[in-house]
Each structure stands twice: as C-alpha cells, then as structure tokens.
Image: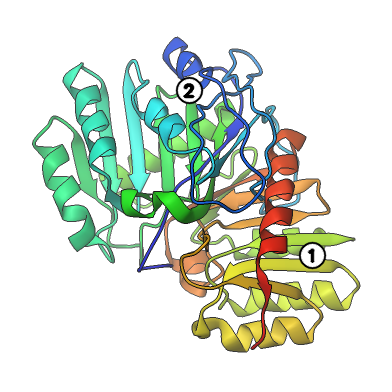
C-alpha cells in the first residue's frame, strides 16, 4: 500500500434506497475528461435502482478502469462509475452529507478536514454516525480525525488489531446503499491520483457490508458474506486469480502494488496463452523483479513516474471488456490475505465502459517500462 500518497473515486450500481440517499445520488454525474489530468470536474453521483433507485446520469468519460474480482454477474443494475481526479470530491462529500438516519464509514486513512466536518454536522443533526479507522499502520495520521470526531458526536473506533491493516474504503448510507472505493479520504492527494468508486445498493450486498461493518466496529470476528458480487479480504486471492484466469482475449489492469506471486503468475500465464494483458502502474523499484517476469511473459506494462501527471492508486481488473473488479485490494500477500479489504465485481456496461475508456487514455499517456 502506498504511504507517500493516496486519493479518491467511485461510481454507481443500484437498488432500493431511502429518500435521502436517492436524493443525494440523483444529483447527477457529469462526464470525465479522457486524458490523465490533475484538474477535477465536479460531478455528483447517482444510480438507478431495482426498486427505489440510486439514480445516476453519467456520461462515460475517458479516464477510468475497473474489473470484477470473481467472474460472476452483478444482480442489481449498475449505473455509474466515479472517476478521480477527473470528477472531484463533490459527489463523495454529497454522499457523506446525505443520510437521514445513519452513516457508517470504514477508512484506512482520514486526513480531510472537510470530510470530518461533514461527519460532525451529520451527527449534530441527529444522524447516527459510526466510523472505523485503521490503527495498525496509520494511527498517527488518523489520530487528529479520531480526536475531532470523538468530540463532535461521532461514534469512532480503532479497527480490530486482528487485521494487519484496515485498508477498506467503504461508506454506507441509511442501510440502503454503500460506496465501494479505491480512495482514501486524504485531501493532499486528491488533485492527481487515479482512483474510482462504485455505488452498490443491492440489498444483499448492503446487508453483508453493514453486518461486516458492525462486527468490525464491535471487534467481533466475522466471516463476511460475499453477497451478490463482493470480494472481501482476508481471502480475496482466489477470486482475483479466477477473474484473471477467465479472460479469453484481453485483461486491463491498474494497481498500486505488484508483489503477490499468485497474481503475477496468473497475469503472466494469461499473456502466455495469448490474452492481451495491459498493465498501468506508477513505477517503483520495489516491483522490478515482478515487472521483469511480466514483461518476459509478454505483458504490455506501462508506467508513470512520480506524481505527475497522475499517480496510479486505483485497484482494478477488466476482463474481456465485460467484467470488472474495483476495490481496495492491492496485489500483495498482506492485502489479499491479512488486511480488511473490499472490492466489487461488476458487469454493467455503464461501469465497464468508462473504466475501459479511462484505462486506454492512461495506457497511451504512460511510458513502456524500461527496466
């Protein structure tokens, strides 16, 4: 996981939601630019639901990628993907300010005074606000937010010590819809980090996410339900390698880390069997051995250097432009086996299409890895 930097993003997938959530998510999603940029376009979120919608009107823009962690279709309609930094934080802030009854937030790193203020305001108007923050790795970063929230009516807890890191990024509103994100709420990274978020209002998924949140909040061991299309860590390695193994023509991959042997082997094996495998990451010497193994197998690996024009923090796999996974999982053993993480598998073209368009733009802008 990246320590010098991080950012936000998300998108939508729908089902029955409360009036507050529907109103929030119906703010409307504007299209994102198709090239890597550090400028954000303000655009709110929305989603269409199976019963009561989480409606979104978003024009697939040109800057994102996502992919399912297990080759299985989603049950509820998915209607939008939020792409960062292109769309800015307004959609996420709007979601945070929308609950009528309750808000639950699981976050690896919270260093954003505006987000903290919104949570405090929610609590001040009678909303039950519960927050879990990582303590194992980000205690010093999270302490100011913890102290502020605890003194402003928010029920805030440190994550259970049973996880190596509480790396999940999840926001649930009124037990009706949740945001599954790749981004942290860390404002200094918002301007130039590639990230995504998906809105999931499938009742089965929401029930699983809320039950898992409550268990983590209470410090009770739990085995999360996969719901309709959820990919949980610890234990997500099999789902991700299954998705990679399901591809017959193409794999498009974003990640921040590349050290998990099973994931590297699966990507290399896909390339060797004739699948076009394209990977976009930010270059780091930590992954040189893995990068060498991938390129030797025929993987097309392109990288950005440093923070400009964009830092790749997104975690995403797109298989054959029809299945996508987006979530918090990095390709490391710790992330897949020891951390609390969450990803979402989707097949909705409204998610997959913009993700592919964004990936193509980033791939074209990045440089081939030179070793």
Q: Which residue is mark 1?
A: 245
Sequence-wise, which precedes: disc 2 or disc 1?
A: 2
Q: Which residue is mark 2?
A: 176
Q: Residue at x 76, y 78 (%)?
A: 268
Quadrant of the image for the N terminus?
bottom left
Q: Assess disc 1: are there few (<14), some (14-19) or many (≥20) residues with their C-alpha within 10 Å of its C-alpha.
A: some
Q: Is residue 114 left or right of residue 7?
A: left
Camera sees residue 163: yes
Which SS class for mark 1? helix
Q: Is residue 182 above or below residue 349?
A: below
Residue 63: percent from the left, percent from the top? 64, 47
Q: Residue at x 42, y 56 (%)?
A: 340
In front here: 266 or 281? 281
Q: Is residue 261 left or right of residue 306?
A: right
Residue 136: percent from the left, percent from the top? 27, 65
Tell me, for residue 288, which label it has, or none: none
Q: Is residue 360 left or right of residue 126?
A: right
Q: Residue at x 59, y 28 (%)?
A: 30
């Amino acid at each position: 996981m990246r320590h010098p930097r991080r950012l936000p993003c998300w998108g939508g997938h729908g089902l029955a939601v409360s009036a507050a959530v529907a109103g929030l998510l119906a703010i409307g999603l504007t299209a994102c630019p198709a090239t890597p940029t550090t400028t954000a376009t303000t655009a709110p979120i929305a989603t269409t639901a199976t019963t009561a919608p989480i409606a979104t009107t978003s024009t697939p823009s040109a800057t994102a990628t996502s992919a399912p962690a297990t080759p299985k279709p989603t049950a509820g309609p998915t209607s939008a993907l939020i792409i960062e930094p292109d769309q800015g934080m307004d959609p996420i802030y709007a979601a945070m300010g929308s609950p009528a009854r309750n808000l639950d937030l699981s976050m690896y790193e919270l260093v954003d005074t505006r987000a903290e203020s919104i949570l405090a305001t929610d609590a001040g108007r009678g909303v039950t606000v519960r927050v879990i923050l990582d303590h194992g790795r980000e205690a010093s970063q999270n302490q100011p937010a913890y102290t502020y929230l605890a003194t402003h009516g928010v029920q805030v807890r440190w994550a259970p010590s049973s996880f190596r890191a509480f790396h999940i990024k999840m926001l649930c509103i009124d037990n009706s819809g949740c945001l599954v994100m790749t981004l942290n709420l860390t404002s200094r990274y918002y301007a130039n980090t590639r990230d995504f978020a998906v809105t999931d209002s499938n009742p089965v998924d929401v029930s699983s996410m809320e039950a898992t949140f409550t268990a983590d909040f209470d410090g009770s061991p739990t085995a999360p339900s996969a719901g309709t299309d959820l990919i949980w860590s610890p234990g997500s390695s099999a789902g991700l390698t299954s998705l990679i193994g399901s591809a017959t023509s193409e794999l498009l991959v974003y990640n921040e880390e590349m050290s998990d042997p099973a994931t590297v082997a699966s990507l290399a094996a896909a390339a060797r069997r004739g699948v076009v495998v394209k990977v976009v990451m930010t270059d780091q010497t930590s992954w040189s051995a893995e990068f060498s193994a991938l390129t030797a197998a025929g993987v097309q690996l392109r990288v950005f250097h440093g923070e400009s024009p964009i830092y790749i923090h997104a975690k995403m796999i797109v298989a054959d432009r029809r299945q996508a996974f987006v979530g918090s999982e990095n390709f490391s053993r710790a992330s897949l086996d020891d951390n609390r993480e969450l990803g979402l598998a989707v097949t909705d073209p409204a998610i997959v299409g913009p993700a592919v368009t964004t990936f193509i733009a980033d791939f074209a802008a990045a440089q081939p890895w030179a070793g």
